[in-house]
Amino acid sequence: MATDLMDRLKILADGAKYDVSCSSSGSSRANSNGGVGSAASTGICHTWTSDGRCVSLLKILMTNACIYDCAYCVNRRSNDTPRVALSPAEVAELTIGFYRRNCIEGLFLSTGVVRSPDYTMELLIQGVRTLREEYCFNGYIHLKLVPGADPLLVQQAGRWADRVSVNLELPTSASLQLLAPDKSRDAVVQPMRQVNRLITINRAERKQSRKVPRFAPAGQSTQLIVGASGESDRQIVILSEQLYQRLDLKRVYYSAFIPVNQDTRLPARPVATLKREHRLYQADWLLRYYGFSADELLDEARPNLDSELDPKTGWALRHIELFPVEINRVSYEELLRVPGVGVLSAQRIIRARRQGHLGLDDLIRLGVVMKRARYFVTARGRSLEATTLDSSSLRSRLIDRTTILKPQQLSLDFSSTADDEIRSLITGEL
Ligand code: SF4
């Protein structure tokens, strides 16, 4: 690779690292005759960082030049940094080159805004279109939508990409106005609404005819920066709930604010730690897979997640009168609310109960994290605890002493010896 191209790639990959809204799951684009790559589940590999970030894609910006001046962004126009760009043809060439060398499974393409949202969106589309049409690339593509771009361009983007995303970045209009004054809330939310509408129409049309080209088959996601502005966890979790319910988002990603600029509008010291980000991810899992609502997790009197307890354990301690539950009798929905019982272990328990009554020993085999669950369950009327504990004594026993490590590669060891907390960190099981 030419040195100049290598240098630009380095800068553009570095500029993209603050965007965590990439995940390569959820698409099943098949290979076609003469094509390369496939986004079918077997064709996509994930690697995970310690805080749950997914890295298996070529993740780059098309350019780090930007006409906007978002306070939190390393690429904002007022920063004195070298500006470089790739042409659409170079993006396509690079992606296919890395793919053929087996380095990546797909592409995550974002960008700064040059000239105008429409012009920038056209460049992005040209890059991915070249990849699909000229190189017959059937691998996974996640494409950023530029807020303010013409709806026709949004429509075209979803034609070529598996997943599209617009980053909300900040939870409220007021924060957006303060920290990203060039972007309006409307310009960000409008394409999200449009994508949701087009996905629904496309699904209906494809039921009539499989020949209808797919539109963003892996759906849409977004990212929220946590801690650059003063919103509570409750505001963030309620917003995420609305995004899942109203716009059918696949994922909301949370990114702990990292100070990269000196700016009086930003907190002097980071107020969001990786632990806060981790707790938000846990709350997010409870919304999506465990049947919890935002109101059950947080309220006006308690607007922030407990840094010492995961949100499900916190909920259980506030509803201690509901426990212990008899593992052989409770419903699947009730099982999901037991600390230490994840979605997989709840499903296994339901299946195993059909063969006969379960004992406490069986629960470990079924993947239940007994370190937490022991205080909340009985099996055949037996408990692991001799006496019933009150909430505050239980709290001191259950305090989470897990250290959230700085992002680094974790080994995917899911054997029974893997640490429960690390496994929970990776899988989201609570
Ligand atoms: S639009 Fe804002 S967040 Fe995006 S690259 Fe430009 S300055 Fe950064």
Image (cartoon, rainbow, N blue to C red):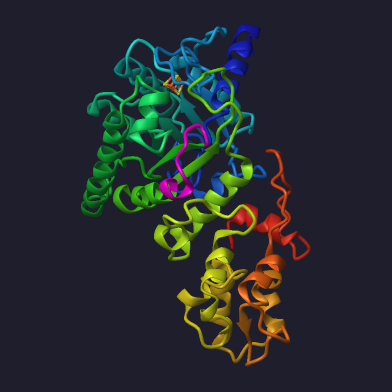
Q: Position of residue 241 (x, y in %)?
A: 38, 52
| Figure quadrant of the C terminus | bottom right
Residue at x 72%, y 68% (from the top left corner): 397
Q: Where is residue 3 drawn, in percent x and y?
A: 65, 8
Tell me what residue is drawn at x 65 percent, y 56 percent.
Answer: 308
Which segment did they paint magenta? 227-236
In the rendered image, residue 229 lying in the magenta stretch gets the answer yes
Between residues 151 and 52, which one lies in front from this camera angle? 52
Towards the viewer: 88 or 369: 369
Left or right of residue 359, residue 277 in this image: left
Asked whether residue 200 is drawn in magenta, I would say no
Q: Is residue 27 in view from this perspective?
A: no
| Ligand 1 quadrant in view | top left
The N terminus appears in which quarter of the rendering? top right
Left or right: 184 in relation to 161:
left
Q: Position of residue 4 (x, y in %)?
A: 61, 7
In the image, 125: left or right of 212? right
Residue 298 visible somewhere in the drawing:
yes
Answer above or below: position of 146 versus 394. Answer: above
In the rendered image, residue 73, in percent from the top left (x then y), is placed at 50, 22
Q: Main secondary structure of the magenta part?
A: loop
